[in-house]
Amino acid sequence: MGELDWTSIPGALPFLWAGMVTTLEITLLAVLVGIVWGTLLAIMRMSGVKLLSWFAAGYVNLFRSIPLVMVLLWFFLIVPALLESLFNTPRSADTRLSSAMVAFALFEAAYYSEIIRAGIQSVAKGQLGAASALGLTYAQAMTMVILPQAFRNMVPLLLTQGIILFQDTSLVYVSSLADFFGAAYKVGDRDGRLVEMLLFAGAVYFLICFSASLLVRRFQKKVAT
Amino acid sequence: MGYHWNWGVFASPVPSGETSYLGWMISGFETTLALSLSAWLIALVIGSGMGVLRTVPNRWLAGLAAAYVELFRNIPLLVQLFIWYFVLPELLPAGLGDAYKGTNPLLQQFVAAMVCLGLFTGARVCEQVRSGINSLPRGQKYAGLALGLTLPQTYRYALLPMAFRIIVPPLTSEFLNIFKNSAVASTIGLLELAAQGRQLVDYTAQPYESFIAVTLTFMALNAIVMSLMHLLEARTRVPGSMGT
């Protein structure tokens, strides 16, 4: 084995940073859309309307039983064709980033909706009754009474899911999109320094995720008391 | 959209002629099964061992297990897989590394994916085992020790039998995850189910048939494993706990 040689990292930092920005963009968008859509799914699932609750249950179970890699491949296949028929974008256009964003947002919503459903169910049942006794409609009770309390309980879990999502975005590798991991892999492949770049990427992910999970844990202790 | 559906594609022979595309799918399915089950075995053994260590009084051992969990939980699965596959053979002593690289490449892919998935999932199993042990009333451990059992005996005869029964439901979801995560192994070229599906797209230009077949197979696998685990859950449920 050759000696480890880290010299290709400094020159590649701007490229790696651009990759990290892509990773963060996908993560943030997927977290935001995932929470909003996930909340709607959770409410639908618990609603008395059979059709809505079946739809939400089907959606969640579908996404939770397929590997993320397959979901990504599906969206890389379908989204370009869809965009083409909707907006007449040329087929050669690079839609990998938008495909990845749509895929992660829809996929994560299934996982978020389960967290949110558990959060809503953790709010005492009497609250809904009390709210309607006070004359609030179901929608008002949800948005002003139930959800604020539910979200407070859920914040640590939602954040932890965000960290998992941040790690999962590395799977856009299957579309050779240059997110942080993709960028690191490309640099390592180009310079013949794959070993060093993979170790570097692993160390960066570890530092970010470990610090983030420590922060979540501290926050959790604070909320719990 | 002008897409030509052709479900007959699975019956047509592959270019080399030795099997049909359906044969490729079946062999991919078998690889997925073999990979997931062998990785699950590793995950259970390592996860149980580490989970016990996390709860022992010795701070060094508990710290070691905690470090294992943090390391394997905070690096993406894909990065771990690439490190096992591309990096570790380079870091072995020269003679051993070369000997390993001389073995069958298919075997190298399988071993890297199996060890990677096993240790990745093991870290999650470890946390479940720990929380299972910690959920038992403290008196159980003290009662065991007071009866003259050694600490290992207390774990073996009092704590672990109860803890494992409690954690069957969360282990079910880890077991399901290992099948889904096994698809990541397609990135290092291991021809499991998802990789066979992509290969079929490359050869036949029938992406929808191939992806639908792979997706449905994963869903069926998920449903089968889930119902088997529900049977196990029903049999191992602790009487008097929730759901009985």
Image: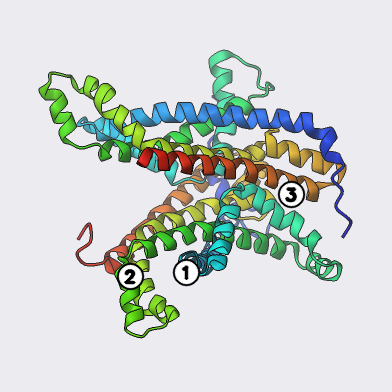
Chain ID of residue with mark 2:
B
Residue furthest right as drawn: A2
Residue A59 lies, in percent from the top left, at 38, 36
Cα distance between the residues tagged 2 and 1: 17 Å
Q: Would residue B147 be found to the left or right of residue A89 on screen?
A: left
> Do marks 3 and 2 share a subunit?
no
Residue furthest left as drawn: A133
Cα distance between the residues tagged 3 and 1: 32 Å
Chain ID of residue with mark 3:
A
Residue A166 or residue A58, whichever sits in front: A166
The local crowd at label 3, few if under 14, some if 14 to 19, many if 20 or more residues have their Cα within 10 Å, is some
Image quadrant where residue B174 sits: bottom left
Front disc: 3 or 1: 1
Name the residue type under label 2.
Answer: Met
Report if residue B31 is visible in the image: no
Residue B37 lies, in percent from the top left, at 52, 65
* Mark found first going from the N terminus, 2 or 1: 1
Name the residue type under label 3.
Answer: Leu
Residue furthest top as drawn: A87
Residue at image mark 2: B162
Task: Tell me, for residue A199, which label it has, or none.
Answer: 3
- Which residue sits at x=62%, y=63%? B115
Name the residue type under label 1.
Answer: Val
The local crowd at label 2, few if under 14, some if 14 to 19, many if 20 or more residues have their Cα within 10 Å, is some
Task: Tell me, for residue A120, which label it has, or none.
Answer: none
Q: Is residue B82 above or below residue B143?
A: above
Chain ID of residue with mark 1:
B
Residue furthest bottom as drawn: B148
Cα distance between the residues tagged 3 and 2: 40 Å
Mark 3 secondary-structure assignment:
helix
